[in-house]
Image (spheres, rainbow, N blue to C red):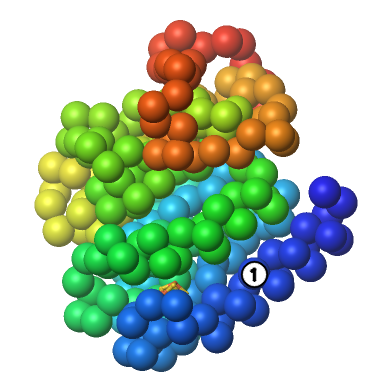
Amino acid sequence: MALSDAEEALEEVHSRVRVCTLCPLSRSRTRAVPGEGAIDAKVMFVGEGPGFDEDQQGRPFVGAAGRLLTDQLKRIGLDRQKVFITNIVKCRPPGNRDPEPGEIDACHDYLLAQIAIIEPKVICTLGRIAAHGLIDRGLSISREHGRPRTVSGIVYLPIYHPAAALHQARIIDSLENDFKQLRLLLDRELGPAPRSSRATPRQAQGRPPQVQDHPERGRGATGA
Ligand code: URA
Ligand code: SF4
């Protein structure tokens, strides 16, 4: 897709999100938070859902967790403006409760549309809810954080949520290691993602085995 077409398509999706009433979260939100970042981002971050600050501002990851995310990005040489940041649900769950499965399902097509338009090479899920919503419902974040898997030409990397590191000191080391894994991944040659098949890992479950990746078995270096 030409960049200007992609910009237009993304803006169209975001306009729909801003007025969406597909799930009950529409009734309690202040503002919907579609997501933001570069249209040609190589890496997309998917969080859980907007919190208080995000709901007020209509922008993702602008509170304390967002500052930690921005810091971690800087540590591995990524500029916040050059990545794309969004959430599994685009409206704040009241009191920051976990989004419910019905809300996640209602919102899923917006995320799939964002992925199809931006065509990231790597999708990094932040925390358990995003990993379950996009990668695998049965994934154990404590066991599988920092371990990438490739499905339909996109590398999915589940990592801890920055908010968890704010509350539990031992998580910060794991989070930093996860970001180092992300840097290694981006340094690898990922190859162009096939455009024909854009199934997410959850959709691809039940299909023949997919390539399983591990950064220690790199295929050679490239810039990202
Ligand atoms: N936590 C999230 O999961 N998403 C945000 O946008 C902010 C905090
Ligand atoms: Fe629509 Fe998603 Fe907001 Fe629910 S969370 S109202 S599905 S944009």
Give the vertical position of 194 relative to 58 (above or below).
above
User: How would you rate the neighbour count of disc 1 (Cα within 10 Å): few for under 14, some for 14-19, many for 20 or more?
Assistant: some
Task: Please state the horizontal and vertical placement of residue 208, each as a whole percent of the image.
Answer: 45, 17
Q: Quadrant of residue 23?
A: bottom left
- Residue 180 screen position, x and y as percent: 41, 32
Q: Is residue 61 something one can see in this rendering?
A: no
Q: Quadrant of the C terminus?
A: top right
* Image-quadrant location for residue 105: bottom left
* Picture quadrant of ligand 2: bottom left
The residue located at (45%, 39%) in the rendering is: 203
What element does badge 1 sit on? helix
> How many circles with numbers are drawn on the protein?
1
Foreground pick, 153 / 41: 153
Q: Residue at x 57, y 29 (%)?
A: 152
- Residue 103 % position (x, y): 34, 68
Task: List the residue tagged with mark 1.
Answer: 13
Q: Position of residue 188 (x, y in %)?
A: 58, 21
Residue visible at 57% across and 43% down in the picture: 43
